[in-house]
Image: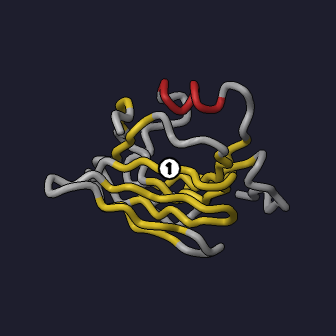
Amino acid sequence: MSREAGPFHLDSTYFRLRPDASAQPLPVGESFWQELSSGALGDFHNEYLVTTHSFSENWPMWEMHPNGDEIVVLLSGSVDFILEKKTGNRVMPLRDCGGWVLVPSGMWHTAKVNAPSTMLFITAGEGTQHRQVDL
């Protein structure tokens, strides 16, 4: 089977990393997040979604991925990445391009944006949950 090899850009095409070590480009349109939430793009069981996002404001939500770890890489800007822990939140400053954090499966996390920032996400998306930030 022949597959499109690109080139692609993460602003317009995310991708899925499958358990068989293949990658699937996912075009990003206006309905992408709705399709993802509704299951129209699959359940992402044992798969990772690779995306980029730019932020100029603090995240309004906590999020948690119950079925796998997440890797978050700072591409530009400055953020304080926050992991929620029973003993108190852990704040991890990301200041340099290429700095990254490993978010363990099941850990709630959010970010405070110190300067407009762009981040790369490698997310075990199956079962992702969100709740309002109360910081």
Number of numbered callouts drawn: 1
Using the image, determine if residue 101 lies above or below residue 114: below
At x 47%, y 54%, the residue is: 123
Residue 74 lies, in percent from the top left, at: 60, 65
Instruction: Give the residue at the far right of this rendering.
Output: 7
The answer to whether residue 81 is left or right of residue 75 is: left
Where residue 84 sits in the image (x, y, percent)?
27, 51
Quarter of the rendering containing residue 135: top left
Dot 1 falls on a residue whose secondary structure is strand
Q: Quadrant of residue 43?
A: top left
Q: Nearer the viewer, residue 80 or 103?
A: 80
Mark 1: which amino acid? Lys
Report if residue 80 is visible in the image. yes
Estimate the x, y position of residue 133 in percent, counting from the top left. Answer: 38, 35
The answer to whether 84 appears left or right of 24 in the picture is left
Answer yes or no: is residue 24 visible: no
Which of the 4 quarters of the picture holds residue 99? Answer: bottom right
Q: Residue at x 57, y 51 (%)?
A: 113
User: What residue sits 33% from the left and 56% below the top?
Assistant: 83
Q: In this view, does 20 lie above or below 49?
A: below
For mark 1, does the 10 Å Cα neighbourhood hold few (<14), some (14 to 19), or many (20 or more) residues? some
Q: In which quarter of the image is the N terminus?
A: bottom right
Q: Residue at x 67, y 25 (%)?
A: 31
Task: Residue 104 in the image: state x and y as whole percent.
Answer: 30, 61
Would you say 6 lies left or right of 31 here?
Answer: right
Residue that label 1 marks: 112
Q: Which colour scheme is used?
A: secondary structure
